[in-house]
């Protein structure tokens, strides 16, 4: 992707004419140019270029902006003054000054350089976005599309996620190799996967991962792309891989405040909240006018460190930055013993969960806790336990099924059986008893037919009769199609494991084509739109209830939960493809 804008860094003035101050001014500019060059969206023109061209003006160098400044001595202090000027028209869009001890510039130079670099990148993006908002989509270039898309993503609604995707897809139409456009698409699916589209969780997870992987393959030196891929991997519970990408992002652009804020949250999830707190502090120092989403990124590390009052102070400034921000407020107040405030924020969290996550459906017992732990991928069990303990102190009721785990002889056969009014599940020497649910019934059917693709309508207990002229599939055709579906799903898994998003996407497209071609034979198409909508509702409902059942199982029987999470595939077709052979009694 092309640079947002070219910026010419001019020599800083030395009004005193003092040789030592001139040396300091030149050194400061050199450090600033080096730091600005770390930002992949800035094209930095060094003042040496201007000198080589006979002192060419910034406009002659093609620079939309130029940075100028001065270093002067004021008694025992040095004052550094910097100005960002729009070359066309000469409008000053940013200025700041820094006063430091005359003999201490070198000690604070890195911090000042980082603050200036962060401010310049933010101001240039803001100025560019303001202009892009006034343009029709057809006249936007690739970077304009990126800025417009990110502007929508920050609003955090499903509608804005869709609008953001339109801008990122436009960017790809202009430049099919735009890494940032793929990164934006990944973020749009990540938003819905991690927080919003609970019933389409698996689909959104795949899309977020595929686009993030593609972005990293196109540009492995963009820190923002590295942090996006790192977060996606953490949410997949691939801790070590995620940590490597987070560290890579910090190496590439250590003064990008947005990267630092994201890395702060990632470090907390990885079990190092102390490092996370330091990163968050540095992010807010480098970007004093930080957006409100920085606050939860800073508060979560503090909460895990037991600094609950500080976490409350931060989150109270933006209690709805994320759906789960009110859950952290409830937990922190609960652990502080502020029962009234804890209850108030718990009520806010539960109301937002119903509005934005379950879309009006009353959550099942234990579902709010399962959801909030799913979207906060803590590597350490003690961190998840602290969060759960705080929510319990706030009054969040637990799932009665969570207390029913009991050991059984290790030789016992794996089973998934009805027992009284519920289910008895036995796996790897532990049995658990759970209350009946549709999701558990779906799982039982899938386990009884391993490697067979079962249509969501069949699991939903609904059928759609074919039209009079629709083809009817015989048993052989169904078996052959099922085999191809399984082969394509295996190809997708292998391609993802090998970080080959192109092959995964090709297999996914063929799978979707098969579903489309079969729709008439299965009664899912060729009739009315109402019937197609019914199939879509069935797919969403079945996906949600299966995934919810797996999370419920994971809460009381982690090994079985992991096995099912790795082996069950949901969507239009659902399949149990065991990661290893299991002799189930169903």
Image (cartoon, grey):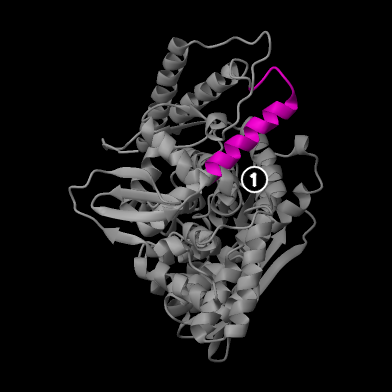
Q: Is residue 1 visible?
A: no
Q: Is residue 412 visible?
A: yes
Q: In front here: 232 or 23?
A: 232
Q: Is residue 543 magenta?
A: yes
Residue 54's spot in the image, x, y percent? 61, 51
Residue 558's spot in the image, x, y percent? 34, 55
Q: Above or below — where is 566 with respect to 289? A: above
Direction front: furthest residue: 420
Q: In front here: 190 or 69?
A: 190
Left or right placement of residue 480 versus residue 320 in this view: left
The span shown in magenta is 524-544
Left or right placement of residue 541 versus residue 136 in this view: left
SS of the residue under disc 1:
helix
Q: Which residue is mark 1?
A: 146
**Residue at coordinates 60% horizontally, 30% vertically from top-left?**
462
Q: Dominant secondary structure of the magenta stretch?
A: helix
């Amino acid at each position: 992707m092309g640079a947002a804008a070219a910026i010419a860094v001019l020599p800083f003035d030395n009004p005193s004419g003092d040789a030592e101050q001139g040396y300091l001014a030149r050194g400061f500019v050199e450090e600033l140019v080096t730091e600005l060059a770390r930002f992949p969206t800035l094209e930095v023109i060094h003042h040496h270029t201007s000198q080589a061209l006979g002192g060419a003006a910034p406009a002659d160098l093609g620079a939309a902006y130029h940075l100028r400044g001065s270093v002067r001595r004021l008694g025992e202090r040095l004052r550094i003054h910097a100005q960002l000027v729009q070359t066309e028209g000469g409008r000053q869009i940013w200025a700041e000054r820094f006063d430091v001890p005359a003999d201490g510039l070198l000690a604070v130079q890195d911090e000042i350089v980082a603050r200036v670099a962060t401010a310049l990148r933010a101001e240039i993006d803001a100025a560019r976005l303001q202009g892009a908002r006034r343009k029709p989509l057809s006249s936007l270039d690739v970077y304009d599309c990126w800025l417009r898309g990110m502007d929508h993503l920050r609003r955090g609604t499903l509608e804005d996620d869709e609008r953001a995707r339109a801008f990122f897809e436009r960017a790809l139409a202009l430049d099919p190799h735009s890494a940032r456009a793929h990164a934006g698409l990944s973020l749009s699916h990540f938003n819905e996967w991690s927080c919003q589209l609970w019933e389409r969780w698996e689909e959104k997870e795949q899309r977020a991962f595929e686009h993030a992987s593609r972005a990293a393959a196109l540009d492995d030196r963009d820190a923002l792309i590295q942090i996006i891929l790192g977060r996606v991997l953490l949410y997949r519970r691939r801790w070590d891989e995620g940590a490597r990408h987070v560290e890579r992002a910090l190496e590439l652009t250590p003064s990008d405040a947005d990267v630092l804020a994201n890395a702060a949250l990632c470090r907390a999830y990885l079990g190092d909240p102390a490092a996370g707190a330091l990163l968050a502090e540095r992010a807010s120092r480098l970007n004093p006018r930080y957006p409100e989403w920085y606050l939860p990124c800073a508060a979560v590390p503090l909460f895990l460190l037991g600094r609950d009052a500080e976490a409350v102070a931060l989150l109270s400034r933006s209690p709805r930055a994320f759906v789960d921000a009110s859950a952290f407020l409830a937990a922190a107040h609960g652990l502080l013993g502020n029962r009234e405030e804890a209850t108030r924020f718990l009520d806010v969290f539960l109301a937002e969960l119903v509005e934005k996550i379950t879309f009006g459906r009353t959550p099942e017992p234990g579902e709010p806790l399962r959801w909030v732990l799913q979207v906060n991928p803590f590597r350490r069990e003690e961190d998840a336990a602290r969060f759960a303990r705080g929510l319990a102190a706030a009054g969040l009721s637990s799932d009665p099924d969570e207390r029913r785990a009991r050991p059984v002889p290790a030789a016992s056969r794996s089973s998934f059986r009805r027992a009284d009014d519920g289910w008895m599940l036995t796996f790897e020497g532990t049995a658990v008893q759970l209350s009946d649910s549709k999701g558990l019934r779906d799982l039982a059917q899938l386990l009884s037919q391993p490697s067979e693709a079962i249509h969501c309508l069949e699991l939903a207990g609904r059928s759609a009769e074919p039209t009079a002229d629709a083809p009817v599939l015989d048993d052989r055709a169904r078996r052959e199609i099922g085999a191809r579906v399984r082969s394509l799903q295996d190809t997708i898994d292998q391609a993802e494991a090998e970080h080959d998003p192109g092959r995964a996407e090709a297999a996914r497209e063929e799978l979707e084509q098969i579903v489309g071609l079969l729709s008439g034979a299965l009664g899912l198409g060729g009739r009315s739109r109402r019937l197609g909508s019914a199939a879509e509702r069935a797919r969403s409902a079945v996906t949600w209830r299966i995934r919810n059942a797996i999370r419920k199982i994971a809460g009381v029987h982690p090994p079985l939960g992991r096995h099912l999470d790795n082996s069950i595939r949901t969507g239009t077709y659902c399949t149990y493809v065991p990661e290893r052979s299991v002799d189930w009694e169903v």
